[in-house]
Image (cartoon, helix red, strand yellow):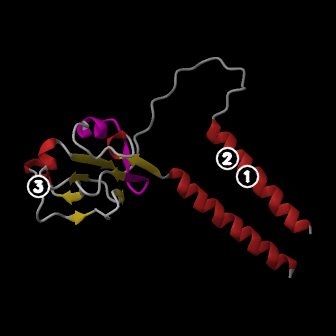
């Protein structure tokens, strides 16, 4: 019976690790660079070019005044001509805080209707299948004391899980 209990605990720990790994990989991109960037006067094209979007790991957060703006996913022609009818999807949830998962490797096009597209409230987001490899860092001398925070967090988490597992196993 203790073996069965240990296997259940081990399975639960593995499931928790998998969930935490997926959460850690996800990234929320605030459109326009802040919580209320879906407004005229923000260079959304430049913002998009400075971001990296990856399939399944990237989410867009649109923050705006819900009484004035909306978020519509459109095709390229509607994006270029600011056509707010016949859209692909109305992303607007009604609260002025909408989240959209980038689930395909393609260019997504978003506009705000009601004439705001003509004022620059539109963005094209190019989503990659995976991130290109990072350039190799320049070699530097180190005394071995500089470990990345992600590495430290990972090892701390593994240590806590091992302690919990063995504590429950010994009881």
Residue 161, percent from left and from top = 76, 57
Q: Is residue 140 above or below residue 47?
A: above
Q: Which residue corresponds to the image point at 72% horizontal and 26% vertical from the top-left?
A: 145
Q: Magenta residues, as a range?
A: 44-60
- Seen from this angle, which residue lies furthest top? 141
Q: Is residue 163 above or below residue 171?
A: above
Query: Which one is closest to the eye, mark 2 or mark 3?
Result: 3
Residue 143, percent from left and from top = 72, 20
- Label 3 and label 1: CA atoms lie apart by 49 Å
Q: Secondary structure at mark 3?
A: helix
Residue 149, percent from left and from top = 64, 37
Residue 55 on the magenta span:
yes
Residue 97 on the magenta span:
no
- Mark closer to the chain start, 2 or 3: 3
Disc 3: which residue: 78
- Residue 51's disc is none
Name the one closer to the observer, 82 or 167.
82
Q: Is residue 135 left or right of residue 75?
A: right
- Residue 158's disc is 1
Quarter of the picture holding the N terminus: bottom right
Discs 1, 2 touching: Cβ within 8 Å:
yes
Q: Secondary structure at mark 2?
A: helix
Q: Is residue 122 left or right of residue 133?
A: left
Disc 2: which residue: 154
- Mark closer to the chain start, 3 or 1: 3
Q: Secondary structure at mark 1?
A: helix
How packed is label 1: few (under 14 Cα within 10 Å), some, or many (20 or more)? few
């Amino acid at each position: 019976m203790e073996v069965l209990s240990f296997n259940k605990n081990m399975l639960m720990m593995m499931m928790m690790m998998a969930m935490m790994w997926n959460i850690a990989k996800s990234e929320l991109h605030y459109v326009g660079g802040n919580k209320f960037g879906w407004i005229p006067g923000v260079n959304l094209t430049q913002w998009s070019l400075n971001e990296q979007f990856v399939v399944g790991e990237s989410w867009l957060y649109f923050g705006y005044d819900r009484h004035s703006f909306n978020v519509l996913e459109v095709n390229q022609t509607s994006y270029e001509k600011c056509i707010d009818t016949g859209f692909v999807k109305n992303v607007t949830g009604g609260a002025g805080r909408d989240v959209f998962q980038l689930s395909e490797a393609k260019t997504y096009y978003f506009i705000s209707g009601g004439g705001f597209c003509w004022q620059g409230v539109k963005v094209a987001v190019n989503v990659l299948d995976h991130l290109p490899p990072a350039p190799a860092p320049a070699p530097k001398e180190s005394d071995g004391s500089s470990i990345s925070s992600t590495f430290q967090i990972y090892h701390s988490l593994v240590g806590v899980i091992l302690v919990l597992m063995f504590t429950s196993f010994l009881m």
